[in-house]
Every structure is written in structure tokens, then in C-alpha cells.
Image (cartoon, helix red, strand yellow):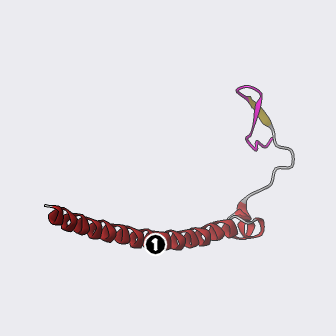
Amino acid sequence: MLVAAAVFAALWLVILYNSTVDLEHGIVSMRGDIKSLQAENAELKEGIYALFDAANFKKNVGSDLVQDKNPEYMEVGAGEKLSLGLRN
């Protein structure tokens, strides 16, 4: 009886060890995926920031926009201001 319990415990420990190793490999793989996603996210953010950079924005989108030197404001809610860019 004692021998059977020892064999069962040894098998259980091997199965537990294999599960732990598989989990560790999965964690390492996920960390690599996360790092590559973070790098891709940084590249996308850099592209968005470059697109909306002041110099590039005027070149790409803002050529038809007119900057209003004296914008008029209207009251919104509890004292907040909202610029409408109205022209007379």
C-alpha cells in the first residue's frame, strides 16, 4: 500500500512539474507577444503624432483652414467656454 502511494505521488509530481513548465513556456511566449505589440503600438503612435504635427498638419490637411485671430465664444454649462470659430 505504501509503495502504491509513493508511486502515485511520484507520478502526480511529474504531472505537476510538466504543467508548471508548460505554464512557464506559455508566459514567456506571451511576454514576447506583448513586447512585439508594444513596439507596434509605439510605431503607430509615432505615425499618428507625425501626421498631426503642426508642420505636417498644415501640409497634409490644414491648407484650406483659416486661423481665426479673434474667436467668439458662447457659454456652456457651468462657466466652460466652447470655441465656435464664428466669423462676422
Residue at coordinates 80% horizontally, 41% vertically from top-left? 88
SS of the residue under disc 1: helix
Q: Nearer the viewer, residue 58 or 81?
A: 81
The question of residue 47 being in magenta is answered with no
Residue at coordinates 40% horizontally, 73% vertically from top-left? 25
Say how many tags the image has: 1
Figure quadrant of residue 63: bottom right
Figure quadrant of residue 47: bottom right
User: Which residue is situated farthest in the front direction here?
Assistant: 2
User: Identity of the amino acid at label 1?
Assistant: Val
Are there few (<14), some (14-19), or many (20+) residues within 10 Å of tag 1? few
Left or right side of 72 for 35: left
Q: Position of residue 65 (x, y in %)?
A: 73, 58
The residue wearing badge 1 is: 28
User: Which residue is situated farthest in the top direction here?
Assistant: 78
Residue at coordinates 79% horizontally, 36% vertically from top-left? 73
Residue at coordinates 35% horizontally, 71% vertically from top-left? 22
Left or right side of 47 for 2: left
User: Magenta: predominant secondary structure element?
Assistant: loop
Q: Nearer the viewer, residue 57 or 44?
A: 44
Q: Nearer the viewer, residue 87 or 74?
A: 74
Figure quadrant of residue 87: top right
The magenta span reads 76-88
Quadrant of the image containing the N terminus:
bottom left
